[in-house]
Image: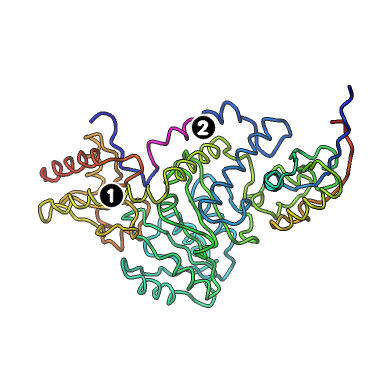
């Protein structure tokens, strides 16, 4: 039986430290979040960086960005660069 | 008494907590990949463990941003990152008269190159007002940095860093604190103290392995990098990344050491920094009391009177007719590990008037006990009766 489709929102983080910080903070606020290497668009963002994958829709993303901003994690460090639907 | 009786904790603490040893072993076995470089699971897991150590250090020292915890190879490395990254041509620096060479040498080197000037401010143990006044009078219009040891590695004397920091910042200077002897023992809160740069060894009062250290900073834009290279981030950029910690962390980190340092920080948090301080103080005061009971003129103590948060558990003394090195060597024959000599602190020995023979240093750690202290005291008694 096919699994339901899941939607993930992507933010970029320039360093692993920011990625970890964002991941821990968002996870502590109930977001489902994964930090991993930026494997697709690193070449467009300076080379070698990280993405924060947040499970949910654009409303979820807005909430996540609000949490990050309140914690002083600059959005310059983490900008939306794509949205993608994948099979869960 | 079997095995070594270790009273050289100011050089590095020994033994390390079991959890430090276990974490180091686990790090080598399970987290052996390079953190922040690759995308595979082991690299990511290692990066997470490294980040956890940043969080623990930030929490212990009141550093508001985890990314402002920079890992270094030791405290001296951290001090050098600040000095070489902050100072510019024509700047003036104030240091204390108890500084370790970790602070003195990089400052003196820049002065020898004609890039900066510096003033050594006199400290007055037990008189904070006089000490702060002395620092204030040493600060000039072009003073960019006040750099000072929190606690002396020679005799444990503590500087009133909060009061000096307040005065320095009112005059527009940055404040560097060398916490080599105080980190994990004396209270340091970066938010409360006004300290801009806190330099720490990982292997002393934080009970991590040697080869670890940290720079904690509350200044976002400083210092500039003095070591450049790969950071695992922004690889296409020819310039060093701006953001911390990458700006100051070029090259592969000592991840196993950092993970074990994280366990050391856990040890301090669980045992309680204040409990550790009280324990060390109790043993140091016990030793001092017995040294003072020895026949007049046989033992010379350098400043060790009251501890009670005014002194780290470091005792410097000499036996009449012997150099500090000789006493340390004789104690070694009893299986006691202490340090003799000048302790990389010429300014302190100049102040204490021990440039001719140095001193023998006893430094207490969390794992010392009164039985060991008695053994040490009896050995000193025997040695002092020989001369």
Give, as a single range, the part of the protein colored magenta: B13-23
Q: Nearer the viewer, residue B249 or B363?
A: B363
Q: In which quarter of the image is the N terminus of chain B?
A: top left
Name the residue rendered at 33%, 55% in the picture.
B156
* Residue at x-position 28% and y-position 36%: B5
**Any magenta on residue B18?**
yes
Measured as percent of width and height from the top left, residue B373 is found at 23, 42
To which residue does mark 2 refer?
B24
The chain to which mark 1 is attached is: B
Name the residue tied to disc 1.
B282
Q: Residue furthest top?
A: A1
Q: In this view, does B29 lie above or below B281?
A: above
Q: Residue at x 73, y 52 (%)?
A: B239
Q: Where residue B151 sits in the image (x, y, percent)?
A: 38, 57
Relative to B228, is B139 on the left or the right? left
Report helix, strand or loop for mark 1: helix
Q: Earlier in the sequence, mark 1 or mark 2?
A: 2
């Amino acid at each position: 039986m096919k699994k339901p489709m899941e939607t993930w929102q992507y933010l970029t983080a320039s360093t692993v430290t920011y990625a970890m910080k964002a991941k821990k903070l968002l996870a502590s606020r109930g977001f489902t979040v994964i930090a991993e290497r930026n494997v697709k668009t690193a070449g467009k963002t300076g080379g070698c960086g990280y993405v924060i994958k947040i499970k949910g829709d654009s409303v979820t993303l807005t909430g996540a960005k609000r949490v990050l901003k309140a914690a002083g994690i600059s959005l310059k460090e983490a900008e939306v660069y794509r949205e993608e639907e994948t099979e869960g | 008494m079997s095995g070594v009786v270790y009273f050289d904790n100011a050089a590095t603490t020994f033994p390390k907590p079991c959890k430090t040893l276990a974490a180091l072993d686990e790090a080598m076995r399970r987290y052996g990949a390079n953190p922040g470089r690759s995308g595979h699971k082991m690299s990511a897991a290692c990066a997470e463990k490294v980040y956890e150590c940043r969080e623990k250090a930030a929490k212990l020292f009141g550093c508001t941003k985890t990314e402002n915890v920079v890992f270094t190879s030791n405290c001296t490395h951290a001090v050098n990152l600040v000095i070489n990254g902050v100072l510019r041509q024509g700047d003036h620096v104030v240091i204390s008269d108890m500084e370790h060479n970790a602070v003195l040498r990089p400052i003196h080197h820049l002065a020898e190159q004609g890039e900066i000037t510096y003033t050594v401010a006199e400290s007055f143990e037990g008189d904070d007002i006089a000490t702060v006044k002395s620092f204030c009078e040493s600060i000039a219009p072009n003073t960019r940095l006040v750099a000072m040891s929190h606690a002396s590695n020679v005799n444990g004397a503590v500087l009133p860093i909060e009061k000096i920091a307040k005065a320095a910042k009112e005059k527009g200077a940055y404040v560097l604190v060398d916490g080599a002897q105080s980190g994990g023992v004396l209270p340091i809160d970066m938010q409360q103290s006004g300290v801009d740069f806190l330099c720490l060894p990982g292997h002393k009062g934080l009970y991590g392995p040697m080869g670890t250290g940290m720079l904690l900073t509350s200044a976002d834009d400083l210092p500039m990098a003095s070591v450049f290279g790969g950071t695992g981030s922004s690889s296409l950029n020819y310039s060093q990344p701006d953001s911390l910690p990458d700006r100051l962390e070029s090259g592969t980190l000592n991840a196993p050491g950092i993970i074990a340092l994280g366990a050391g920080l856990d040890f301090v948090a669980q045992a309680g920094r204040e409990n550790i301080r009280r324990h060390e103080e109790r043993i140091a005061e016990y030793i001092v009391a017995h040294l003072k009971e020895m026949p007049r003129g046989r033992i010379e103590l350098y400043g060790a009177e009251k501890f009670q948060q005014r002194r780290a558990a470091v005792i410097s003394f000499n036996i009449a007719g012997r150099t500090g090195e000789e006493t340390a060597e004789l104690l070694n024959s009893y299986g006691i590990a202490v340090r003799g000599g000048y302790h990389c602190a010429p300014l302190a020995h100049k102040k204490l008037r021990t440039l001719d023979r140095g001193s023998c240093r006893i430094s207490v750690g969390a794992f010392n006990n009164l039985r060991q202290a008695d053994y040490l005291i009896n050995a000193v008694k025997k040695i002092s009766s020989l001369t």
